[in-house]
Image (tube, grey):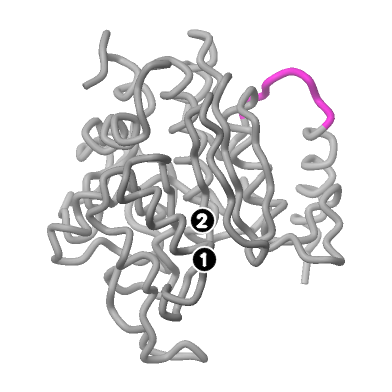
């Protein structure tokens, strides 16, 4: 059910989709506006949103999961080409002339073998053909652990497990807010964490999900599109960089001083920092 706060947010969502100018949102890190001021807005980059839009989804009013996540990615990278794809439509191909980013704000608890969409996405991550950004999950457990309760009890997010360690994959957890050195952030209570596997830790980032500023929305679903937008912004600066280089730039420049009691088993590489990712004069 959508509450009053979410209704107001939906009105803002509808207005924002028709606005031509960029606007710093309250839930964004200030680093986003700083990147825009340098001219990096995701231009020339393609973000593919694999999500649930549904036959009866009213995208203009944001009445589906995919509308929320798409709005976030487009808000962070306003000049990227953000393309929506229903999660059951099949394989989404790559555009050769662009850096391809895929946002996966969903869990996948079946074997990947009979599912061509997920197998293709895993292949893109393995080959470094696209930046694959995957939400970590909302069970307050390490990535790869079995869900402890509910209808998914005993099951594992096999897509997250398969993407861990792949060259151009990023797994994204949620902080309760954006952190700063003076006011570090803690993990959101619902968010999955990196866990003790160094393979998972290598590909794990966190970003703030300000539920109050997002109309009451919470979940790692709304952390992933922030990082997808970051990848587009980084790609719009480093125009010759491939997907693996862009993913590594975000992973290697994450901050550990903006999270409370940094521990790689919780935060992985740390909080994504767009400013640090854009700072170098070259990318390797």
Q: Main secondary structure of the magenta part?
A: loop
Alpha-carbon span between mark 2 and mark 1: 15 Å
The number of numbered badges drawn on the structure is: 2
Q: Residue at x 21, y 34 (%)?
A: 252
Q: From the top left corner, tell me how far across and down residue 200 is, in percent.
A: 22, 59
| Circle 1 residues within 10 Å: few <14, some 14–19, many ≥20 | some
- Front residue (pair 103, 5): 103
Give above or below for 213 relative to 58.
Answer: above
Residue 122 picture quarter: bottom left
**Label annotation for residue 104:** 2
- Front residue (pair 41, 94): 94
- Front residue (pair 193, 189): 193
Q: Residue at x 66, y 45 (%)?
A: 70
Q: From the top left corner, tell me how far across and down residue 42 is, in percent.
A: 54, 23
Q: Earlier in the sequence, mark 2 or mark 1?
A: 2
Query: In the drawing, does residue 228 fall left or right of residue 6?
Result: left
Query: In the drawing, does residue 108 fall left or right of residue 202?
Result: right
- Residue 196 falls inside the magenta stretch: no
| Circle 2 residues within 10 Å: few <14, some 14–19, many ≥20 | many
**Label annotation for residue 116:** 1
For the record, the magenta segment spans: 18-24
């Amino acid at each position: 059910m959508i509450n009053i706060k979410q209704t107001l947010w939906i009105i803002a969502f509808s207005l924002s989709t028709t606005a031509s100018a960029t606007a710093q949102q309250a839930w964004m890190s200030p680093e986003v506006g700083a990147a825009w001021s340098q001219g990096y807005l995701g231009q020339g980059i393609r973000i593919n949103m694999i999500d649930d839009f549904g036959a009866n989804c009213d995208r203009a009013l944001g009445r589906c999961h995919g509308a929320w996540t798409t709005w976030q990615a487009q808000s962070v990278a306003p000049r990227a080409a953000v393309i929506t794809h229903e999660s059951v439509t099949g394989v989404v191909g790559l555009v050769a002339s662009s850096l391809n980013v895929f946002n996966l704000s969903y869990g996948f608890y079946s074997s990947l073998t009979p599912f061509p969409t997920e197998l293709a996405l895993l292949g893109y991550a393995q080959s470094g053909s696209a930046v694959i950004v995957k939400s970590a999950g909302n069970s307050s457990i390490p990535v790869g652990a079995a869900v402890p309760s509910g209808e998914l009890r005993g099951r594992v997010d096999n897509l997250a497990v398969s993407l861990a360690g792949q060259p151009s994959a990023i797994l994204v957890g949620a902080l309760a807010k954006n952190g700063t050195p003076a006011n570090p952030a803690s993990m959101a209570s619902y968010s999955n964490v990196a866990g003790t596997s160094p393979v998972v830790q290598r590909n794990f980032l966190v970003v703030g999900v300000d539920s109050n500023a997002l109309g009451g929305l919470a979940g790692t679903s709304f952390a992933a599109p922030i990082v997808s937008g970051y990848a587009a912004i980084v790609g719009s600066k480093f125009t010759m960089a491939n997907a693996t280089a862009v993913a590594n730039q975000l992973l290697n420049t994450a901050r550990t001083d903006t999270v409370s009691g940094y521990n790689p088993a919780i935060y992985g590489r740390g909080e994504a920092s767009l400013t640090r990712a854009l700072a170098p004069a070259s990318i390797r």
